[in-house]
Image: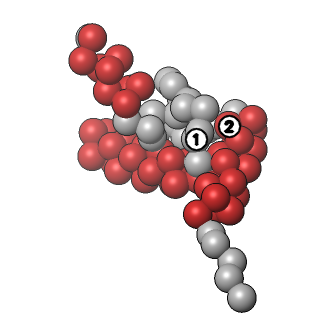
């Protein structure tokens, strides 16, 4: 299971197992898509897809900061 632990910490969409400090809304969307697709492919049902409110707030704020950091306003 060592490979799985490495996978969980490296693949940013495993938000129920590990949350990166710089989690963003793209990670959240990938988490949702992965849960739906993997659940349907494996069992024909969508698996439980929940996140802590704090993860969503952090992802929201980090996404804003990422966008601001990458925008240069010129006159």
Check disc 1 and report its element: helix, strand or loop.
loop
Q: Is there any visible trace of residue 6 in the rendered image?
A: yes
Horizontal arrangement in the rendering, residue 70 relative to residue 8 (left or right) = right
Secondary structure beneath label 2: helix
Q: Position of residue 74 (x, y in %)?
A: 68, 82
Q: Which residue is mark 2?
A: 55
Residue positioned 54% across, 32% down in the render: 20
Mark 1 and mark 2 in contact (Cβ < 8 Å)? yes
* Left or right, residue 1 beside residue 65: left
Q: Residues within 10 Å of mark 1 (few under 14, many from 20)?
A: many
- N-terminal of the pair, mark 2 or mark 1, is 1
Q: Nearer the viewer, residue 73 or 38?
A: 73
Question: In screen coordinates, is 55 left or right of 11?
Answer: right
Read off the residue under disc 1. Answer: 23
Q: Residue furthest top?
A: 2
- Image coordinates of residue 33 in percent, x first then y, are 43, 53
Residue furthest to the front: 75
User: Which picture quadrant has residue 49?
Assistant: top right
Mark 2: few/some/many CA within 10 Å (<14, 14-19, 20+): some
User: In the displayed structure, does residue 43 sit left or right of residue 75?
Assistant: left
Residue sticking out furthest to the bottom = 75
Quadrant in the rendering for residue 51: top right
């Amino acid at each position: 299971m060592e490979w799985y632990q490495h996978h969980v910490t490296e693949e940013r969409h495993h938000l129920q197992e590990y949350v990166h400090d710089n989690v963003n809304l793209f990670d959240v969307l990938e988490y949702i898509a992965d849960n739906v697709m993997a659940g349907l492919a494996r069992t024909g049902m969508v698996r439980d897809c929940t996140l802590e409110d704090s993860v969503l707030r952090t992802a929201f704020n980090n996404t804003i900061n990422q966008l601001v950091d990458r925008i240069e306003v010129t006159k």
